[in-house]
Amino acid sequence: MLLPWDYGVRNLARRPVRTALTLVALATVVMLVFVVVGFIRGLERSLAVSGDENVVLVYSVNSEENIENSSIAARSPSLLTASVEGTVKRFGVTHVSPELYLGTRVKTESGEGGLGLVRGVTLSAPLVRRSVQIVEGDWPSDGEVLVGRLAAAKLGSSDESVRIGKTLEFEGRQWTVSGRFAAGGAAYESEIWCRLGDFQTATKRQDLSLVAMLLSPSGSAAEVALFCKERTDLELRAIRETDYYGSLQRHYRPVRLLAWFVVVLVSAAGIFAGLNMMYGAVAGRVREIATLQAIGFRRRAILISLIQEGVLLAAAASLLSGVISLTVLNGMAVRFTMGAFTLRIDSAAILIGCGVGLLLGVVGALPPALKALRAEVATSLKAV
């Protein structure tokens, strides 16, 4: 025969201080799990949605995977459009975007700032970067910039510092913010865009970093790659944008593995903390447990009741942490080497976080409960 369900609930209410402390401890552990898993899921999603399978990136063969170090001739876009067929062309406009992409120091009006990602673009950039949408303001004119939704997070400054009309300083010039854009969570959201000609003048460069080409269904990325191999004098390489961001996923794989290892460490620390608190809780109930055995309850029934208490506490802690994570952590911007992205508390993160919480409740309650039940009933009844 099992103990009544409400017996475990009443036990938790009889020790409000200890119950509250245990709840806070478990909620803190589960919250850390949510933060780390949200970090992993946010990084993976940012890289996953950044690529467009119809876009081919052409950049310097010597830059390997780092486009910021790429330098190609300014005539490369015209050579590519003249030599390669299959590029989208509508209303006489070829969907090819020449770009200059650099990491540089950016300072706001308040003196804040840090390393920002600046991309010099032309009016054809939104035609190729189809996920980009201006959500506020206008396209930049001379001396103006368009800032991404997460540009402030990348700079380590506040959103107020990159509002429309504010001034940014980089490459020895003052730039006025003309608008803000979003890109559905893509990596572009942490960038600052300005006119290509202005940026080339400011950096005293006439070259480009890359050319982005939007291919039609009849176009072939292999044809672009073949052209780059044949024109060895240009020292170009071509790669689908999805493959490029896929390589970044592989590059950041050790970071993700380290984050999962942190999840395991945090969970292990939480289990040990739960063990410690449950040992203390059970140690003060030795006579109660012995009395239950003396009046006829089996050890299995008492064990289930003790585990029930631990699981109830862990479930409450998981729910509390889940609510806080969804309302506070979800969507919080995080600065990273590749730019910035948002923590993502999705269904997978909720499942992992709550699963770890319930595991803490079971594993934390089991060893101390077993230890208490192994003691002799007569000896336990005499315990103080």
Image (tube, rainbow, N blue to C red):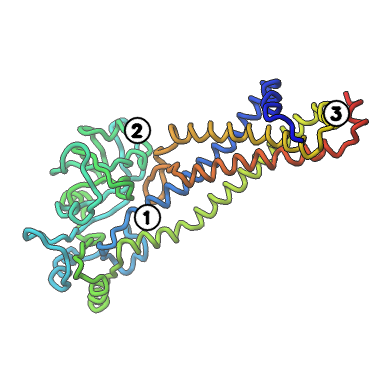
Asked if the residue under mark 1 is in contact with the one under mark 3, i.e. CB atoms within 8 Å, the reply is no
Identify the amino acid type marked 2.
Ser
Asked if the residue under mark 2 is in contact with the one under mark 3, i.e. CB atoms within 8 Å, the reply is no
Crowdedness of circle 3 by 10 Å Cα count: few (<14), some, many (20+)?
few
Crowdedness of circle 2 by 10 Å Cα count: few (<14), some, many (20+)?
some
Mark 1 vs mark 2, foreground winner is 1
At a point 89% along the width and 27% down the height, the residue shown is: 381
Identify the amino acid type marked 3.
Ile
Please name the residue that numbered disc 2 is placed on. 158
Mark 3 vs mark 2, foreground winner is 3
Asked if residue 291 shows in the view, the reply is yes
First of labels 3, 2 by sequence position: 2
First of labels 1, 2 by sequence position: 1
Could you tell me which secondary element the residue under label 3 belongs to?
loop
Residue 48's tag is: 1
Crowdedness of circle 1 by 10 Å Cα count: few (<14), some, many (20+)?
some
Front one among 333 and 162: 333
Front one among 205 and 137: 137
Query: Left or right: 189 with respect to 124?
Result: right
Query: Left or right: 189 with respect to 18?
Result: left
* Distance from Cα at disc 1 to Cα at disc 2: 27 Å
Name the spot of residue 370 as percent of width and height, x first: 79, 40
Q: Quadrant of residue 221?
A: bottom left
At a point 59% along the width and 37% down the height, the residue shown is: 29
Name the spot of residue 149 as percent of width and height, x first: 30, 40
Please name the residue that numbered disc 3 is placed on. 295
* Distance from Cα at disc 3 to Cα at disc 2: 65 Å
At a point 71% along the width and 29% down the height, the residue shown is: 4
At a point 53% along the width and 33% down the height, the residue shown is: 319
Q: Quadrant of residue 368?
A: top right
